[in-house]
Image (tube, helix red, strand yellow):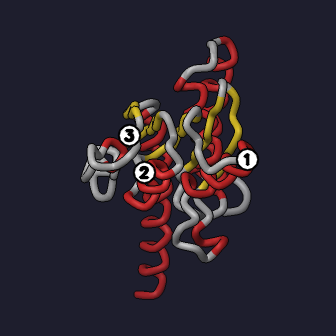
Amino acid sequence: MKGSNRFTDDWTARRAVATTLSMIEPQSDEYFMREALRQALKAGKADEVPVGAVIVRAGKVIARAHNQIELLKDATAHAEMLALTQAEAGVGDWRLTDCDLYVTKEPCAMCAGAIVHTRVRRVIFGCADPAAGAAGSVINLLQMPTLNHRCDIAAGVLQDECAEILQSFFRERRDSRNKIDSLEGD
């Protein structure tokens, strides 16, 4: 998705206002979720499902990633998985016990499993995933009592913005497919 389009133009305008406001606020869950939203926007521009993630340690972002499934031809290249790998390299350990993960959409089972294995302290997500969410929507792997680690969870941070970026992306995809279908039907 090169150049300007409705998805990026609308999102950029809203983001400019939010960025200005976040500059005067202390770093908060909303601040870091906006960083994750920036990553999601990069994914959308690359025609990937727009999910973004950042990992924070001691108040600083140590990893940033967005979905790269299509680019890497890798079903495991979810934003969370890529961010976890970056953070592990940055910390020099696979244990991320003093780190928080911010992600725009509720993690799936694969990502939730990796989050538990890396012992992330806290997971903050924007919008729920009622079809495949593994942080409470379908199953809660992040707080499974039988596992050796449980994460604190904060859900719904900038929920509307996180949901809108996904909805806009899929709306544009449907509209494009409908236009192609109508042209082929003529």
Q: Name the residue tied to disc 1.
A: 92
Mark found first going from the N terminus, 1 or 2:
1
Query: Dot 2, how many residues are within 10 Å of its Cα: few (below 14), some (14-19), or many (20+)?
Result: many
User: For this view, does 163 lie left or right of residue 141?
Assistant: right
Q: Mark 2 touching mark 3, by CB under 8 A?
A: no
Q: Position of residue 10 (x, y in %)?
A: 58, 41
Q: Nearer the viewer, residue 72 or 159?
A: 72
Mark found first going from the N terminus, 3 or 1:
1
Q: Is residue 42 visible?
A: yes
Residue in view at x 56 percent, y 20 percent = 28
Q: Label 1 sits on what residue type?
A: Gly
Mark 3: secondary structure:
loop
Q: Name the residue tied to disc 2.
A: 107
Q: Is residue 44 visible?
A: no
Query: Dot 1, how many residues are within 10 Å of its Cα: few (below 14), some (14-19), or many (20+)?
Result: few
Q: Mark 1 touching mark 2, by CB under 8 A?
A: no
Q: CA distance from mark 1 to mark 2?
A: 24 Å
Q: CA distance from mark 3 to mark 1?
A: 22 Å
Q: Label 2 sits on what residue type?
A: Pro
Residue 165, relative to residue 71: is it above or below? above
Q: Name the residue tied to disc 3.
A: 150
Q: Position of residue 94 (x, y in %)?
A: 62, 50
Residue 152, relative to residue 129: is it above or below? above
Mark 1: secondary structure:
loop
Q: Nearer the viewer, residue 52 or 95?
A: 95
Q: Position of residue 174 (x, y in %)?
A: 43, 66
Residue depth check, mark 2 versus mark 3: number of the one nearer the observer: 3
Residue in view at x 57 percent, y 48 percent = 52
Q: Nearer the viewer, residue 24 or 28?
A: 28
User: For this view, does 93 lie left or right of residue 126?
Assistant: right
Mark 2: secondary structure:
loop
Quarter location, residue 64: top right
